[in-house]
Amino acid sequence: MKAGNGQLVLIIYLCLCPSQQFNELQVCSQCSGTVLDGSAVGLFCSSSAGRIAGRCCVGNKTSDPERVIGLDLSNCSLNHVGYLQEASTALIIDLSLNPIVNISDSAFQGFIDLKNLTLPADIACPGGNTSWEKVELTKGNRLCEGQKNMCNQTGQMSVNCPEYSQCGPFGPGFVECRCADNYHGYKCLREGEFPALQVFGPLGASTLVLSLLLWVTQRRKAKSL
């Protein structure tokens, strides 16, 4: 009986808990060591009252204690930039001192909070120089500072968002059309709040039923033993 209850708890935990806890974020452990106190990310973390977690600086706000606000992957022998979306909330990222060949602009798609990006000198800022307030070469690095909101730029390709939507930033050089309040769905044509209960309710119910079935099955196997 105790074994069956333990299995039920484990099943419910796996179904209801987030798929990934903060201490398992791969982006914070892509290379050894931790953020150095005297580095740009380290100084930013200290001034922002953040805490160091591997190569990440994490915010201490009670509302979002696992939010990555800084990422330091400098001097990590990186030949390419892999999946960084776990740090899409970062305000500062350092990729200097790496033999990176090139970086796809889409690597920073969704990084709407990014304000300071340090790259090897021969790597261009994502989105091009027009996507940043300031671009400069210094000490063998390229600094990309002050990400611009491309929705507000003159001389750029116009963004034709559907009716009931508006343009919004979506990372360096990227924009997206966001539905206005009280609209959702394809091309923001559906009015009213998103029916979360109707969409996710059946999914939650089916997950619970599956969990119970698994528990009953495992319990019968345990009794047969």
Image (spheres, rainbow, N blue to C red):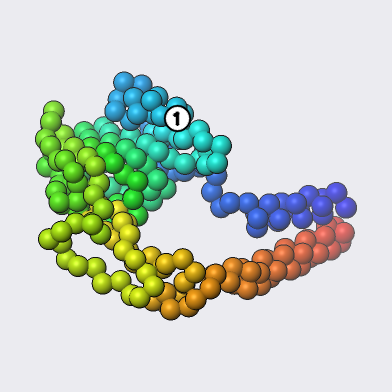
Residue drawn at 41 percent across, 68 percent down: 179
Q: In what quadrant of the picture does the C terminus appear?
A: bottom right
**Could you say where residue 204 lies in the image, as x and y percent from the top left?**
66, 66
Q: Classify mark 1: residues with Cα within 10 Å, few (<14), some (14-19) or many (20+).
A: many
- Residue 42 visible from this viewpoint: no
Instruction: Look at 68% across and 52% down and name the residue there.
Output: 13
Percent across and percent down for residue 93 are: 30, 38
Query: Which residue is pictured at 14% across the width and 48% down the height?
Result: 129
- 29 vs 218, left or right, is left
Please tell me in which quadrant of the rendered image residue 164 appears: bottom left
Residue kind at label 1, given as amino acid type: Gly
Task: Please count the marks in the image.
Answer: 1
Residue at the limit of the structure toward the top, as seen here: 38
Q: Is residue 62 left or right of residue 54?
A: right
Where, by quadrant of the figure, is residue 76 drawn? top left
Q: Does 104 sit left or right of 92 as displayed? A: left
Which image quadrant for residue 42? top left
Residue named by callout 1? 50
Where disc 1 sits, the SS reads loop
| Closest to the observer, 121 or 195 | 195
Instruction: Report the residue at 18% width, 37% height from top.
Output: 143
- On the image, the x and y values in percent for residue 31 come to 36, 35
Closest to the observer, 31 or 135: 135
Image coords of residue 102 (percent x, y): 18, 49
Examine the rendering and report whether any part of residue 122 can be seen. Answer: yes
Q: Is residue 97 above or below residue 9?
A: above
